[in-house]
Image: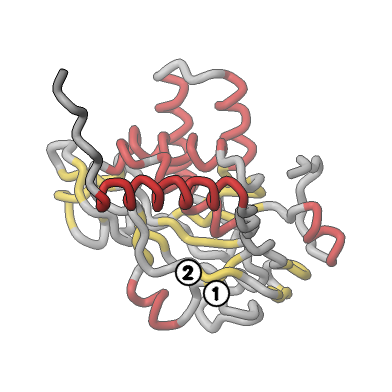
Amino acid sequence: MPRRPFPCPLARGLLLTCAVTVLAAVAMPTAPVQAAPQCLSRSIGAPTHGRLVAGRRLPSWGTHYAIQPFTVRNGYVWGTCELIDGLRWVADELAGTLQGRPLALGNLSPRKGGEMPISSSHESGRDVDVAPLMADDLGRPIPSYYHHFDRDGISRSHGPRFRFDVARNWRLVEVILACPHFEVEKLVIAPYLRDSLLAYARQQNAAPELVGLAERKLVPPWPGVKLHDNHFHLRIACSVADLAAGCQDSMPQRVAF
């Protein structure tokens, strides 16, 4: 009968080392997982006379969004946690609609809120400007900028090659209204662009509940305010914590989150 080969010392040493390592791993307690730091941002006062405490900064670039250069230069890139988390969610949710082009974002708020020379609001971390999604004259998606659109959705500032993409902008409205991170207080847009969006939604047989919600949240600007024919102005409602800290909004009903 052939003799069994004797295991080499190196192999035995490796086996012993592995066994000790496994036993040590089982015996030693694992380090506790550190929870993400809680965000304590607070929107205090009204968007036209307010401030932002412990706000969060939105990075200039994300996977599916980009902040306009003039906004970054001015440092108007701060908001409440709900707004910042919500904008990231909206951009990611729109990835297919954007087709590789970033969602273009404009002014949020200064780091501590307060007055902005170029705006009468955006003071309490709950406002952001969003450039409409655009198409060329053949209906192909193109990068979005702050073009001024006429009643036919054609760029008054840059010519007929640039169009307000009604279908994709309705999708943008849908996603914003569905965001789980915030409740929309209002989404301001020129009245004729609002009409185009709602007419498109009805033509597509959108759910009546969604159309009704869009009718309430999509609003024209107040008289004397800029027409908002070149961007959406999104204002989110005060969170429950913000309301307790003195946040002011005009929502008749509250949704806890």
Say if residue 99 shows up in the picture. yes
Give above or below for 224 relative to 52.
above
Of badges 1 and 2, nearer the viewer stands 2
The type of colouring in the image is: secondary structure
Amino acid carrying mark 1 in the image? Ser
Indicate the quadrant containing the N terminus: top left, top right, bottom left or bottom right.
top left
Give above or below for 76 relative to 164.
below
As helix, strand or loop, the secondary structure at mark 1 comes to loop
Which residue matches tag 2? 107
Which residue matches tag 1? 119
Say if residue 82 shows up in the picture. no
Give above or below for 46 relative to 24.
below
Indicate the quadrant containing the C terminus: top left, top right, bottom left or bottom right.
top right
Amino acid carrying mark 2 in the image? Asn
* Quarter residue 252 falls in: top right
Image location (x, y in percent) of residue 199: 44, 27
The tag on residue 230 is none
For this orientation, the residue located farthest to the front is 1
Q: Nearer the viewer, residue 68 or 7?
A: 7
Q: Is residue 199 left or right of residue 30?
A: left
